Image (cartoon, rainbow, N blue to C red):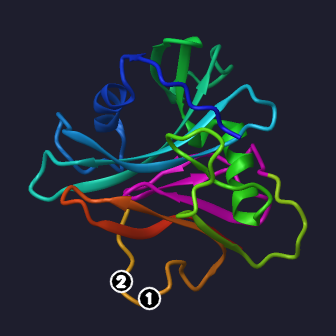
């Protein structure tokens, strides 16, 4: 399970995202985000080499707060061919230099997120070692064959989501702009054969639930 180090990061994750978010096509705010942490979870890399974190942040700089889901991967060396996906570098108080990438472009994250959809792995708490995140829910209605991402699939952004590498014939999307589910309404859309959903905290301290990722045929 994920090991969380209680140490200092320079720059912090929020500082990195404040510089990076305005460059994204799905970012709706100003050139100077005012970010607050709103939640998130982690996944484990089976090889233990890559940190995988799904960070939820709320930007309060505009007229209405907007909440974003930002998956990041942390590596101890640059990822070949992923210069375009580099969010920034940090100095970790225990692990030393870390390269932080937009996780949608990292094959380790793509594989583990599909494994989460299937139920082969479990979501880990964002800030506590060796603890599951019980707020993360998922479903899968496939035939039981392990899902493997087709890494030749182009990772593309639109105004609210990112298309991730998916098995042949499927579409896998990560929701970037988070929308609360309506009361008593299903979280996953009717065309979904698999999904991941979770919760986040609003600036006033309440909790919202919504869709994080959806797999469709």
User: What residue span does the magenta drawing correspond to?
Assistant: 149-177
Residue at left offset 75%, top offset 43%: 151
Q: Is the stretch drawn in magenta largely helix, strand or loop? A: loop
Is 51 located above or below residue 12 in the figure?
below
Residue 175 in the magenta stretch? The answer is yes
- Residue reaching furthest bottom? 184
Is 181 located above or below residue 61 in the figure?
below
Residue at the spot of label 1: 185
Residue 211 tag number: none
Residue at left offset 64%, top offset 69%: 138
Q: Quadrant of the C terminus?
A: bottom right
Where does residue 186 sit, x and y in percent of width and height? 50, 85
Residue 176 in the magenta stretch? The answer is yes
* Relative depth, front residue between 103 and 155: 103
Q: Is residue 13 left or right of residue 197?
A: left
Q: Is residue 152 left or right of residue 177?
A: right
* Relative depth, front residue between 128 and 204: 128
Where does residue 158 sit, x and y in percent of width and height? 43, 55
- Residue reaching furthest left? 63
Residue at the spot of label 2: 182
Residues marked 2 and 1 touching at CB (< 8 Å): yes
């Amino acid at each position: 399970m994920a090991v969380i180090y209680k140490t200092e990061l320079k720059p912090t994750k929020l500082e990195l995202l404040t510089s990076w978010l305005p460059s994204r096509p799905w970012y709706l705010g100003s050139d100077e985000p005012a970010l607050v942490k709103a939640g998130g979870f982690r996944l484990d890399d089976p090889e233990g080499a890559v940190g995988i974190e799904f960070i939820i942040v709320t930007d309060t700089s505009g007229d209405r707060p907007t909440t974003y889901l930002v998956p990041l991967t942390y590596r101890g060396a640059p990822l070949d061919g992923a210069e375009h996906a580099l969010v920034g570098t940090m100095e970790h108080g225990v692990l030393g230099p870390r390269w932080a990438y937009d996780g949608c472009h990292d094959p380790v994250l793509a594989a583990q997120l599909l494994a989460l959809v299937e139920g082969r792995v479990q979501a880990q708490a964002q800030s506590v070692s060796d603890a599951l995140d019980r707020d993360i829910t998922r479903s899968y209605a496939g035939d039981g064959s392990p899902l493997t991402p087709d890494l030749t699939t182009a990772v593309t952004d639109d105004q609210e989501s990112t298309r991730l590498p998916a098995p042949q014939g499927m579409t896998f999307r990560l929701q970037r702009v988070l929308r609360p589910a309506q009361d008593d309404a299903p979280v996953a859309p009717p065309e979904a054969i698999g999904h991941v959903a979770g919760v986040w905290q609003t600036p006033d301290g309440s909790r919202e639930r919504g869709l994080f990722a959806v797999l469709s045929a």
